[in-house]
Image (cartoon, coloured by chain):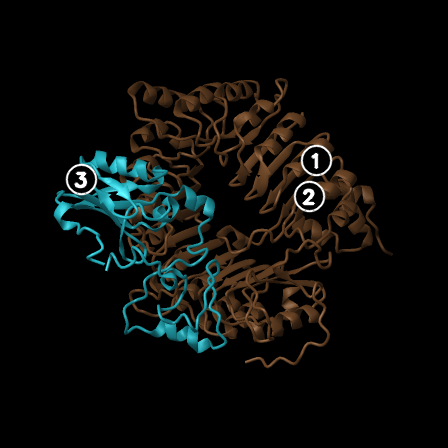
Chain colours: A brown, B cyan
Amino acid sequence: MALRLPSKVLEHILSFIDSNEDRNSVSLVCKSWFETERKTRKRVFVGNCYAVSPAAVARRFPEMRSLTLKGKPHFADYNLVPDGWGGYACPWVDALAAKSPSLEEIRLKRMVVTDECLEKIAASFKDFKVLVLTSCEGFSTDGIAAIASTCRNLRVLELRECIVEDLGGDWLSYFPKTSTSLVSLDFSCLDSEVKISDLERLVSRSPNLKSLKLNPAVTLDGLVSILSRAPQLTELGTGSFAAELKPEAFSKLSKAFSNCKQLQSLSGLWDVLPEYLPALYSVCPGLISLNLSYATVRMPDLVELLRRCSKLQKLWVMDLIEDKGLEAVATYCKELRELRVFPSEPDLDATNIPVTEQGLVYVSKGCRKLESVLYFCVQFTNAALITIARKRPNLKCFRLCVIEPFAPDYKTNEPLDKGFKAIAEGCKDLRRLSVSGLLSDKAFKYIGKHAKKVRMLSIAFAGDSDLMLHHLLSGCESLKKLEIRDCPFGDTALLENAAKLETMRSLWMSSCFVSFGACKLLSQKMPRLNVEVIDEHPPKTRPESSPVERIYIYRTVAGPRMDTPEFVWTLHKNPEIGVSRLAIK
Amino acid sequence: MAYEKVNELNLKDTELCLGLPGRTEEIKQEQEVSCVRSNNKRQFEETLDDEESTPPTKTQIVGWPPVRSYRKNNSVSYVKVSMDGAPYLRKIDLKTYKNYPELLKALENMFKFTVGEYSEREGYKGSGFVPTYEDKDGDWMLVGDVPWDMFSSSCKRLRIMKGSDAPALDSSSL
């Protein structure tokens, strides 16, 4: 006798399940579970905007209230994806405006968003509440004004590191005088000055405002005035601290901060002079997150600040912190979960990077809860990696950027194979890994063998042969995103592991030796993959064996995309009759 | 050596490439893409294994180190400034200046001197102080010849040469 769970009961159970991974599993059980799940999913996540059509998403999830979309591949962050490649938000907004008018939240990452698109959002979704744009581009402050003026119940407006055509600070005045719903506002990436009186008024009438991130154009005086009107803030991004230090200004600032008793997260701090840091001391004991990555403050001042931050869980800082400063972090910030150390001179020629592998070793030893690392330095050693792996088996994200390409272990001159082997083997929960330095195929054999939970892997200037790629594609069971640059091989491993690519979100390879013929063959073999050859300067004739500049492969149920620019080659645009037999070396 | 490039724009030298200088006929580089185009994998290895010659002058590799341009634009670029005869060096953040006049004014204030009048033809005339800089290739160049943006991204250090040490650049010395 088959017992069937009444759909009302199933619905009730599902209301407790938020994780989309779990919901995806639920939807695979049987048709009725699929139906119940899809009708109750409110938060939809689409990791690749070209993997599925907007209409299909709207159709499947009629109760969708929140949509998160990602567009360009991650390496677009480092200028490896030419302008005009794609990732347009418009088709999505158009489809959703028609089919999902109850949509309340849109979160976009690495997408091209136009003013028209923003105006459409403002006009189409009556109860629109949340707009978060991360690393997006293509719009101006006029589009922001449209959102501000039209979305009566807007709660969240965050522009995170977007490239915005800044037409002035007027957009802020477009928030209606009656709007009181704001919870979070982030305009830190805008250049223009906003009228401080407009900001003061907006803040004063927004009792629910918890997060405010100002742009560098907001002065210290402005900051003081805002803080005095919003002492309830939990997250603050300051404006510029560049003003000359005056004693009254300092004490006003100090007092303003000390009144913010709920502040947990602090960022901004552009151009902060060390003399101003003591004004922050009163909030340090409560801080959970501190982003000093734009603050060119030196080690002694950093240590004075950080030793007061005993509750700190997330620290982003520049390498000016030096190994010594990281030793202090290891001593005082015992709750640290995430550390990012950015290069103060992000330059290949930089010879004087003040952190070494020792700094990361200190933190790995001292901070038991450390699980996420992004670390830039000039060189590294296997011994350090082995120590880090041994001390911190709980690492979930490990991104090491040894700035010198092909840099071996500088003490033994060996490749860093053993070190990354230790990381892959020891950190069993590792989800994200970026490797660098001199690495042979062996390193990738170890990674393929042990890194069973790694979902995202980034590789540059590494490996000896196709074996590297083969180890990864055949070994890493959970691999979803693989991005590779400047590794001179590709064909054989790619074609042998073609089926694996359908289990992944995407594969990016640039400046490798993937031949044009292999790309064509792969496209023909795998109809459910979009294979894009991205060549800004394609040769006049393209023999099968010629290497391509970049290849971006992703699984899709939406078929070939129609909005490719000229420099993107797809099989769909170029149907070939008969692919000649490849001589794969 | 520093004056070799003043009048002649050596395009080959400004071309970006990953290998050693002189291998450009095998490894063709596009300006924007760091791409080793060669069907011969050994070619790639050869450029790396060549330890006998002097290390290649480091050139820019697109997108490396992997720092978001948003962050790069906000980062500092401190360069050392030396003045002939001064007992110690100073450091300035080039990003705080938007153009040559601002920079020169700051230098004049810092070291208490005045720089002469700049002309493309004759460099700085009038004061005996000549502002020069070391670029990414290790060459010493005259401040002011190239567009500001190009200068500020390629300047590694500054040196203010004094009167007698700064040879006059006239047609007889070329």
Q: How many marks?
A: 3
Chain containing mark 1: A
Residue A524 as seen in the image, left or right of residue A547: right
Badge 2: how crowded within 10 Å, few (<14), some, or many (20+)?
some
Task: Give the residue number, with chain letter if any, for mark 3.
Answer: B127
Residue B76 as seen in the image, left or right of residue A558: left
What's the amino acid at mark 1?
Answer: Lys
Q: Residue A429 placed where, x, y %?
A: 52, 56
- In the image as oriented, which residue stretches furthest toward the front? B171
- Cα distance in 3D space between marks 3 and 1: 61 Å
Q: What residue do we see at 40% from left, 29% from top?
A: A283
Find numbered disc 1 in the image and state the secondary structure of the residue it sits on: helix
- Cα distance in 3D space between marks 1 and 2: 9 Å
Quick one: quadrant of the N terminus of chain A? bottom right
Question: Is residue B4 visible to us here?
Answer: yes
Q: Are marks 1 and 2 in contact (CB under 8 Å)?
A: yes
Q: Residue A579 placed where, x, y %?
A: 68, 76
Task: Give the residue number, with chain letter if any, for mark 2.
Answer: A90
Residue B174 as seen in the image, left or right of residue A408: left
Using the image, tell me which numbered label, if any, was put on residue A131.
Answer: none
What's the amino acid at mark 3?
Answer: Ser
In the image, residue A131 sits, relative to residue A338, either above or below, namely above
Q: Nearer the viewer, residue A526 or B37?
A: B37
In the image, residue A138 sits, relative to residue A489, either above or below, namely above
Q: Nearer the viewer, residue B13 or B17?
A: B13
Q: Residue A345 placed where, x, y %?
A: 35, 49
Chain containing mark 2: A
The quadrant where residue A153 appears: top right
Task: Give the residue number, with chain letter if any, for mark 1.
Answer: A120
